[in-house]
Amino acid sequence: MSVEGGQWIPVCRIDEVPVDDVRSFEVEGLPTVAVYSIEGRFYITDDCCTHEEASLAEGELDGEVIECPFHGGSFNVITGAVVSRPPRRPLCTYEVRVDGETIGLIVPES
């Protein structure tokens, strides 16, 4: 579905992401994404750590910070910014839109 600023792509249902937790999902045409539920709001980033190939959904979520399970680097899931090293590059974040019970992301127009 086309929306202002890009294309909305459904990712998962709200009930698939427990409150204050994270889950990974495959999305056709994109890298695997991590969906975070934090205090009733949803955020989506790429699931792969920018330092090593590790699933961030297997890491530990503390508030709005996700810690990579491999080397302890962490990112702010809202901004994608590196919070602690070894990662040096930020995470790709996506605009999130909820439609009914479905969480989706917006892929910007190229």
Image (cartoon, rainbow, N blue to C red):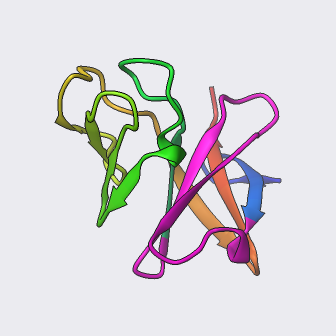
Image quadrant in which you'd find residue 4: bottom right
Does residue 33 lie above or below 71 as drawn? below
Does residue 91 lie above or below 39 as drawn? above
Hey, which residue is sitting farthest left in the picture?
84
Residue 70 position, x and y percent, is: 38, 29
Residue 50 position, x and y percent, is: 39, 22
Q: Nearer the viewer, residue 52 or 12?
A: 52
Q: Nearer the viewer, residue 6 or 9?
A: 9
Indicate left or right for 56 with 16 as reference. left
Tell me where the magenta segment starts and ends, as one range: 13-41
Residue 5 position, x and y percent, is: 59, 47
Residue beneath the point at 40% across and 37% down: 69
Residue 109 position, x and y percent, is: 64, 34
Hey, which residue is sitting farthest front in the picture?
70
Indicate left or right for 13 with 78 as reference. right
Taking the magenta stretch, the answer to whether it contains residue 2 is no
Does residue 2 lie above or below 89 as drawn? below
Residue beneath the point at 27% across and 40% down: 74
Image quadrant in which you'd find residue 100: bottom right
Residue beneath the point at 30% across and 61% down: 64
Image quadrant in which you'd find residue 87: top left
Q: Nearer the viewer, residue 89 or 87?
A: 87
Residue beneath the point at 38% across and 53% down: 60
Taking the magenta stretch, the answer to whether it contains residue 32 is yes
